[in-house]
Amino acid sequence: MALGLLIMGTAISAYAVWSNSFANTGNDFNTDTLNPPAGLGATGGASVSLSWTATADTYASGHRVLRGTATGGPYTQIAEVTPRTTTTYPDSPAAGTYYYVVRAFYQNWESANSNEASASVTVSTGFLDCTANAAVTTGSGDNNGFQTSPGNACGDDGAFAEDTNSGTGSPHDCSSASKDRHLFYNYGFSIPAGQTINGIELRLDAWADSASGNPFMCVELSWDGGATWTAAKTTTTLGTAEATFTLGTSTDTWGRTWSDTDFTNANFRVRITNVASNSQRDFRLDWAPVQVTYTPP
């Protein structure tokens, strides 16, 4: 290739020669992917608690929380959580089941979704009182249950039901025919059709005249008017002062799957059995309410 120059009217020739070729590729840039958070977990109940492990990218501004009503989405953003080190979020939607993912973000850059986690917001009936009761009069000790003021167990008012000199034998066993039993029912539940029953709790405010003989109470539940019963749950040993014992939890279904129709007044029953290793114990019961927790469909 020849180059020509004109200086002060004089032409000067110059030459440049390239003896090797050089390939000039495009510019190289470093690339990065904004990592999503990991380990998302969700715990339900009256509300939902979310927790996760922060994105590994320390330059991220924080995380965005998204919620859906079906697994796999679609999801809608419900919160933006900053700084990056904040890795929890409380959510209080209406009762139902929800599905969550979390994304990391930096300015207008957003990561892929975290793993999906789900949780249910439940509804509770609150503790409801019975309005009816009856002693079990066959195969149950002296067959008179709480023979003194049994209706007092259907209200939290300080008055109590009493089973005096309970039972006729010494077996320390809920299923023994020598133990006194009593039914409590008509709790007036109003659970809408199609609900998922999550758990049942029964509260006993109870005590005995003495701890001798290791007195305790057994509780069974029926869903068919008393024809069939769950396995028994038991209190610890009763003391000589009134104490509260809660059997079951908001997530304990007592070993079976329940439906809303199981809780009608015609179907639902509570059976309490008073157990001690002698028949000289007096059992006292101030209150025996029941609470059901459920999730709408």
Image (cartoon, rainbow, N blue to C red):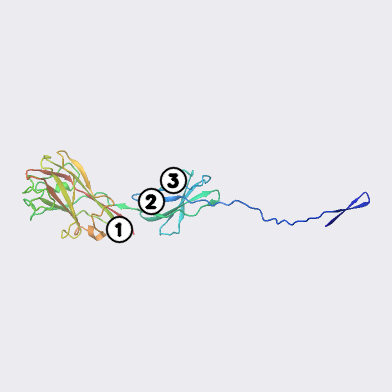
Residue in front for this viewpoint, 184 or 114: 114
Q: Residues within 10 Å of mark 1 (few under 14, many from 20)?
A: some
Residue depth check, mark 2 versus mark 1: number of the one nearer the observer:
2
Callouts 3 and 1 close, C-beta under 8 Å: no
Q: In this figure, what is the number of numbered marks?
A: 3
Q: Position of residue 218 (x, y in %)?
A: 16, 49
Picture residue at 42% right of the left edge, 51% below the top: 40
Q: Which residue is mark 2?
A: 42
Callouts 2 and 1 close, C-beta under 8 Å: no
186 over 238 or under it: above or below: below
Q: Which residue is mark 3?
A: 87
Residue in front for this viewpoint, 247 or 114: 114
Residue in front for this viewpoint, 1 or 104: 1
Label 2 vs label 1: CA separation?
19 Å
Label 3 vs label 1: CA separation?
30 Å
> Which one is earlier in the sequence, the residue at label 3 or at label 1?
3
Query: In the image, is 12 to the left or to the right of 232?
Result: right
- Hey, what amino acid is under mark 3? Thr
SS state under label 2: strand
SS state under label 1: strand
> Which one is earlier in the sequence, the residue at label 2 or at label 3?
2
Q: In the rendering, which numbered label is found on residue 9?
A: none
Query: In the image, is 38 to the left or to the right of 267?
Result: right
- Hey, what amino acid is under mark 2? Ala
Q: Which residue is mark 1?
A: 196
Q: In the orientation shown, which residue stands out farthest toward the front?
A: 19
- Hey, what amino acid is under mark 1? Thr
Residue depth check, mark 3 versus mark 1: number of the one nearer the observer:
3
SS state under label 3: loop
> Which one is earlier in the sequence, the residue at label 2 or at label 1?
2
Quarter the N terminus occupies: bottom right
Q: Residues within 10 Å of mark 3 (few under 14, many from 20)?
A: some
